Image: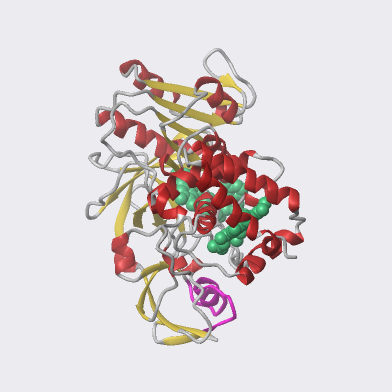
């Protein structure tokens, strides 16, 4: 049996159980959401013992070196012991500066942190409410702007999105943990064609990345495909059209599954992409939003010749309710 | 490992960096082949690519060691899902095509194919 120590108490782990599941099962409250190693909400730090390698996949080297790990992916071998603490030290207090609707289903949240957060546009943060509720959101803002900008889709019955839409007020305080993720622009090859594609609020990181690339003087074509079920699901369309007028290398392509028009193409995102970018060899791509769609696009682009190292993805995995155990195979 | 002075195909190919390039070519072929792609559809493409790399390193005589028992155990779940000679032949075909596409000389390709063939019984659990 493996054991984990948290705030002076020892907790036994069942065989193959993750640290997150074991602590939640025994009544310890730990922030968590996707339980698949993607959202990083359940970040914790080991103060003694050895962390299995799999629990640090995707973490920055600086975090690894300090013993940080993902509790949902941490399954200590039988007979070992681990002493852990929360990741409170990494959280930055912040306050809500403004809340406004970008469309009927998307809320723009602007946050100001008490101390500066170093990040790249397109990375994501974990938003932690005072009671410990944690969810990840991607950064649509640029670091030099005065507030962090998030685009939050209103999820029916959603704990965090519902609270932000109905209860939260400017001035309310929260904590921000992160940033994380590799979805961002890296300067250096200004002529390389870029392909950005996402559905729904998958636009948030892409909006940040496009503006970052343009600000860095990117000269090669920058394709942005934004997909939604219906035209109501698209947002920031006039801002993006204006950006495309200012920057001829930026090509904005909104698409919908039904209800297309002169300005909005109709069809599945991968079909629209293939029609305009049939040979993306040597390109760099970012894919964000709905999980299954991101994974299937990624595979299609890989088969079309894009290299895995040039394919950056953030799948917006939903939260998994407590009580439901994280699967052993895991998404990673 | 035998103590011959002869360089492995792996070394002759250019070692680790060459494997990284070969993996993408090989994995793309495998995923595009409907006859076998379902065995390789891991949602985590990086993880799957790492396994393909282990495969290529092994059949080119590089620094990984899997025993016949490991090969049996590793592929046993696939055998349960119907893995048979036709799938093996398809993988072998993609391996050969990958090496040829990368410009590997025919005698080296033949060597790799012999190593791959020698794993058939273990992979298919016979
Ligand atoms: C890396 C990462 C980045 C993310 N970035 C963003 C972002 O920029 N903008 C954004 O809006 N969201 C983003 N998300 C998703 C976000 O973290 C939350 O999952 C989402 O906002 C729902 O949280 P909630 O508390 O409102 O709903 P919850 O209370 O978590 O969910 C309510 C119910 O709806 C289900 N549910 C939630 N989402 C979905 C879904 N997509 N499909 C099907 N069922 C669902 C839940 O399982 C639950 O039953 C991201 C997620 C990850 C992992
Ligand atoms: C030439 C004979 C073969 C050899 C030498 C070989 C070798 C290997 C090796 C070394 C691994 C990595 C194991 C690990 O690190 O976990 C592996 C994994 C794998 N092989 Fe093979 N293989 C062969 C044939 C095949 C065939 C014919 C198929 C299916 C059509 C196949 C499907 C797989 C799959 C799906 C995995 C990953 C399993 C997992 O996700 O754990 N292999 N193989």
- Asked if residue A217 lies left or right of residue A79, the reply is left
Furthest residue toward top: A262
Q: Splitting the image into 4 quarters, where does residue A184 fall?
A: top left
Q: Which of B79 and A193 is in front in this view?
A: B79
Residue B70 appears anywhere in the view: yes
| In-image side of A143 versus B51 (left or right) | left
Q: Is residue A104 left or right of residue B16?
A: right
Q: Nearer the viewer, residue B17 or A196?
A: B17
- Report the quarter where the N terminus of chain A lies: bottom right
Image spot of residue A89 (x, y percent)? 29, 67
Q: Can residue A294 be seen in this snapshot?
A: no
Magenta residue span: A12-29
Give above or below for A254 relative to A67.
above
Instruction: Return the x and y of residue A156 as percentages of the image width and height.
Output: 60, 46
Residue at image coords 56%, 46%: A291
Residue at 29%, 59% in the rendered image: A92
Which residue is found at the position 41% from the left and 31% from the top?
A: A283
Q: Is residue A133 above or below residue A49?
A: above
The image quadrant of residue A281 is top left
The x, y position of residue A259, in whole percent, is 63, 21
| Residue at 50%, 74% in the rendered image | A19
| In the image, residue B76 lies in the stretch drawn in magenta | no
């Amino acid at each position: 049996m493996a054991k984990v120590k948290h705030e002076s108490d020892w907790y036994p782990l069942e065989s193959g159980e993750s640290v997150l599941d074991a602590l939640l099962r025994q009544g310890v409250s730990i922030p968590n959401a996707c339980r698949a190693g993607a959202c990083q909400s359940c970040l914790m730090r080991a103060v003694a013992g050895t962390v299995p390698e799999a629990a640090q996949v995707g973490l920055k080297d600086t975090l690894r070196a300090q013993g940080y790990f993902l509790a949902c992916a941490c399954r200590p071998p039988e007979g070992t012991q681990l002493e852990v603490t929360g990741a409170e030290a990494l959280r930055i207090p912040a306050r809500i500066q403004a809340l406004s609707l970008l469309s009927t289903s998307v809320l723009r949240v602007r946050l100001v942190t008490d101390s500066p957060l170093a990040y790249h546009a397109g990375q994501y943060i974990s938003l932690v409410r005072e009671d410990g509720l944690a969810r990840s959101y991607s950064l649509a803002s640029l670091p030099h702007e005065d507030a962090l900008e998030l685009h939050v889709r209103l999820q029916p019955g959603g704990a965090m999105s519902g609270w932000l839409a109905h209860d939260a007020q400017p001035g309310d305080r929260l904590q921000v943990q992160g940033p994380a993720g590799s979805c961002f622009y890296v300067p250096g090859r200004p002529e390389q064609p870029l392909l950005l594609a996402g559905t729904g609020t998958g636009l948030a990181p892409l909006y940040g990345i496009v503006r970052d690339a343009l600000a860095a003087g990117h000269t090669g074509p920058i394709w942005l495909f934004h997909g939604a079920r219906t035209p109501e699901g698209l947002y920031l369309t006039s801002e993006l059209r204006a950006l495309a007028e200012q920057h001829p290398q930026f090509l904005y392509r909104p698409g919908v599954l039904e209800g297309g028009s002169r300005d909005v193409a109709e069809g599945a995102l991968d079909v629209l992409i293939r029609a305009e970018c049939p040979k993306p060899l040597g390109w760099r791509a970012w894919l964000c939003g709905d999980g299954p769609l991101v994974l299937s696009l990624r595979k299609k682009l890989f088969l079309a010749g894009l290299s895995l190292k040039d394919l950056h993805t953030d799948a917006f995995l939903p939260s998994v309710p407590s009580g439901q155990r994280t699967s052993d195979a895991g998404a990673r | 490992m035998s103590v011959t002075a002869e360089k492995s195909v792996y070394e002759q190919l250019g070692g680790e960096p060459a494997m990284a390039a070969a993996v993408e070519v090989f994995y793309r072929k495998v995923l595009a082949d409907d006859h076998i792609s379902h065995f390789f559809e891991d949602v985590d493409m990086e993880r799957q690519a790492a396994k393909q790399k282990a495969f290529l390193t092994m059949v080119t005589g590089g620094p990984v060691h899997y025993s016949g028992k490991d090969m049996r155990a590793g592929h046993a779940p696939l055998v349960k899902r119907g893995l048979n000679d036709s799938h093996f032949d398809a993988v072998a075909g993609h391996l050969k095509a990958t090496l040829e596409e990368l410009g590997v000389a025919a005698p080296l390709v033949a060597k790799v194919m012999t190593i791959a063939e020698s794993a058939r019984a273990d992979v298919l659990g016979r």
